[in-house]
Amino acid sequence: MNDDSSYRNRYRFAFLAIAFVMISLPAIGLYPSTSNGHTGLTMLLMGVVAAGMGLAIWVN
């Protein structure tokens, strides 16, 4: 458990930067995919956003 905590603390900035990108970049394609009716792409992009939020929660 201690090794896991130190690993998160060592790479905290990198993990938070990845989480920020995972949350903010899919928004570029999210609006066009929903307005054009591409359900699969919309679900994929929402999954990336949810994974980024999960990563941010895990780091903090």
Image (cartoon, rainbow, N blue to C red):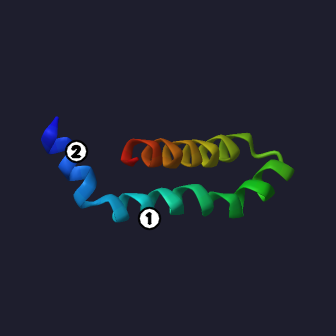
Percent position of residue 37, x then y = 82, 45
At horizontal 72% and vertical 54% (from top left) the residue drawn is 30
Percent position of residue 52, x then y = 50, 49
Residue 39, compared with residue 56, is above or below; it is: above
Q: Secondary structure at mark 2?
A: helix
Identify the residue position indicated by label 1 in the image: 17
Q: Earlier in the sequence, mark 1 or mark 2?
A: 2
At label 1, counting other C-alpha atoms closer than 10 Å, the crowd grade (few under 14, some 14-19, many 20 or more) is few
Answer with the quarter of the image where residue 2 lies: top left
Left or right relative to 11: residue 33: right
Q: Secondary structure at mark 1?
A: helix
Distance of label 1 from label 2 (alpha carbons)? 18 Å
The answer to whether residue 36 is visible is no
Percent position of residue 49, x then y = 58, 48
Residue 57, compared with residue 30, is above or below; it is: above
At label 2, counting other C-alpha atoms closer than 10 Å, the crowd grade (few under 14, some 14-19, many 20 or more) is few
User: On residue 34, which mark appears?
Assistant: none
At horizontal 80% and vertical 48% (from top left) the residue drawn is 34
Identity, as a three-letter code, of the amino acid under mark 2 = Ser
Percent position of residue 12, x then y = 33, 59
Identify the residue position indicated by label 2 in the image: 5
At horizontal 65% and vertical 40% (from top left) the residue drawn is 43
Left or right relative to 19: residue 40: right
In contact (CB < 8 Å): disc 1 and disc 2: no
At horizontal 76% and vertical 53% (from top left) the residue drawn is 33
- Between 33 and 5, the one lying in front of the other is 5
Q: Nearer the viewer, mark 1 or mark 2?
A: 2
Left or right relative to 21: residue 10: left
Quadrant, the N terminus: top left
Identity, as a three-letter code, of the amino acid under mark 1 = Ala
